[in-house]
Image: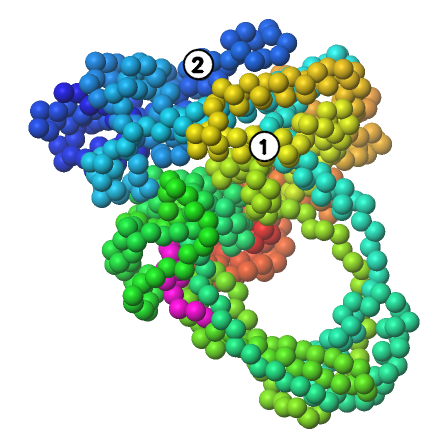
Amino acid sequence: MHEVIICEKPKSSEKIANALSRNTIKNSYKKVPYYEFEENGKKTTVLSAVGHLYSLSPTNSKQDKIFDIDWVPLYDKDKQKKYVKNYVDAIKKLAKGADKFIHACDYDIEGTVIGYNALKYACGEDSIDKATRMKFSTLTKEDIVKAYENPIPIDFHQVDSGIARHVLDFLFGVNISKYLTDSVREATSRYVQLSAGRVQTPTLSILVDREKEIKNFKPIPYWLIKAALQDDIIADHKAGKIFERKEADGILADCGDADAVVTDVTLRENKRTPPVPFDLGSLQSEAYGVFGFSPKRTQQIAQNLYTEGYTSYPRTSSQKLPKSIGYDKILKQLSKNAEFKKHVDALKKPLKPNEGKKTDEAHPAIHPTGTLPTGLDTNEQKLYELIVYRFISVFGEDALQESMKTKLNINSQEFSFSRKRMAKMGWLEHYPFRKIEDEKFPDIKKGDTLKVNEILCEEKETKPPARYNQASLIRELEKRGLGTKSTRANIISILYDRKYIEGQKIQVNELGEHLIDTLKEYSEDITSEELTRKFETELEDIMADKITKDSVIEEAKVGLSSILDDIDKNKSKIGEKLYEAYQESRIVGQCKCGGNLVMKYSYRTKGTFVGCSAYPKCKVTYPIPRGTNVLKTKCEKCGLPMISFGKPRQRACLDPKCGRNGKESTNEVVGVCPQCGEQLIKRMGRYGEFIGCSGFPKCRFTKSVEEQEAK
């Protein structure tokens, strides 16, 4: 009897093999590790994919509309993935003649497709009939053994939904991108690689709509009346924003030099319930707000923590913690860490988590497994502690906050001020990532008189809507039903990579804005949220066996064909407008000669640089490192744009000879070092600005300027 277990990644295969047997032997084939053990006359081989082994590709790339596609080995399509061939070869060789197969990839749509394709194309189509599925949410020995001993059938509706998603994304992305790129080439004889996608383009459209709201916003002046009282109390006039200057002047005149009389003091006690457990979206949002991690970075770190066995599966939409995960056992294991123990010991039994409404049939909310980590880097440690403290605080008691609202009368004009303080910390004792309002309450009562030091009239202007950041955009996509928990972070990352958007506070550049404007004018369906949301619903319906994979794909081809016909009818106009936008998007500043500084591509070095548009009359050029972003901010010394580059991101002047790149330091204090408690100082290093600890060289903590600003 020969049994083959297919895992998603090498680390997973190692953990699964070692969990299932003490007699596991590690071997390798073409430098690909695999594991074997024999028990009770059964030989088991544990093999690993390395993510996706197969990818969709056109069967005829010369087609005008690319609708005929098939799965091919990833290394045939992407020459940078040659290493994948060794994994495919290892599976083919070592799975040959096996009697039984177990699909043990991550239990989500992507993991299901990875394992299904490995079985179908590497092990042979007959392997699927001999296969079962392991379902687990953590890579702990207990969960692995339980999943192995209680296998389930492969969910072919999940397989079909995953395949349909891949097909839809491929057909929309490849065809629309091809048609847009061809439109520029036919209109201008220039090659500009443009990108569009089924979810990517509606997402960009949301950002463009916000960009236009901001650009078209006209500020309206208003006035705020405040009273500066004794004991540093600032009270606000009840009118709030006042949009007529005469009304503000009238209030000021009425107040005169009178004192403030306390007309009412209201004390309330408000309950603050514990937070709910993390799903992927809320973890991404919290990590962005606390640490400045991008959603994609958070997802990568969370995946690493899961693969190492320290936390549960991260790509979940659940805010539930079922009792079956073993609260007591996890908390007991966490208590082996002295810091965690203080918080665990303070929890009151019986333990009952405060859960949210969102559920996920595949996995519970994100939680620690109880296995204490070793060898984590700084960012992994941060995210791990965030997950642990959130898990502990979910079992905490309600916090109690007291509020005081005081109403005042100044010559018949009504003012008020409020204060908040903590009466009981409750769960907040266990979650150090929340800002706590703990203000001092003044000792006053109804009828008291307070001295008025000054009546202030502040003139302000209404502000445009705020730009999205990566975390708030993910929340917006979730609210609108666009993308999935697993794909949203990557969609945003693609928009940055395509240079359609930039900045921590997301700003759409000319190319991104004109792309959406042009598509809305000539083929609005491409930017349609409704079309994208409709397909998302149908992909879920495939999972629920309400509709078939083939019917969804055929329907998509009909809709896509109509979109492509619209582009084809207006190719010349679309190409001209997109090329004009592309030219504008390359401008990064002005040259001393009066020409524009533009981003250019060097076919000799295969990289980008900045050069003058007046070439060859002006031969000014500036080299830039790979992966550089040119920023809106200007160098204080020479006026050229600043650039951001490297990991962690560093800032420098575009001109490498500018003294702004020298070793002078601003020595601006920007925070407190999380490792030693000394000051964090903004410094100027050889390659630009960075944040460093004042305790150097004893403490070598550093971070990027962008990470600090995001925080």
Q: Nearer the viewer, residue 181 or 647?
A: 181
Crowd around label 2: few <14 · some 14–19 · many ≥20 (10 Å): some
Q: Position of residue 178 (x, y in %)?
A: 64, 17
Quadrant containing the N terminus is: top left
Label 1 element class: helix
Residue 153 in percent (x, y) is at 29, 29
Left or right of 464? Residue 478 is left
Judging by the rendered image, the residue that carries numbered circle 2 is: 72
The region drawn magenta spans 384-399
Q: Position of residue 389 (x, y in %)?
A: 39, 58
Disc 2 marks a residue whose amino acid type is Val
Q: On the image, numbered disc 1 is attached to which residue?
A: 534
Viewer-closest of 217 and 164:
164
Label at residue 42: none
> Which residue sits at x=55%, y=18%?
554
The image quadrant that residue 616 belongs to is top right
Count of number-bearing discs: 2
Q: Colour scheme of this structure image?
A: rainbow
Query: Residue at 48% of width from left, 37% of height from top?
Result: 486
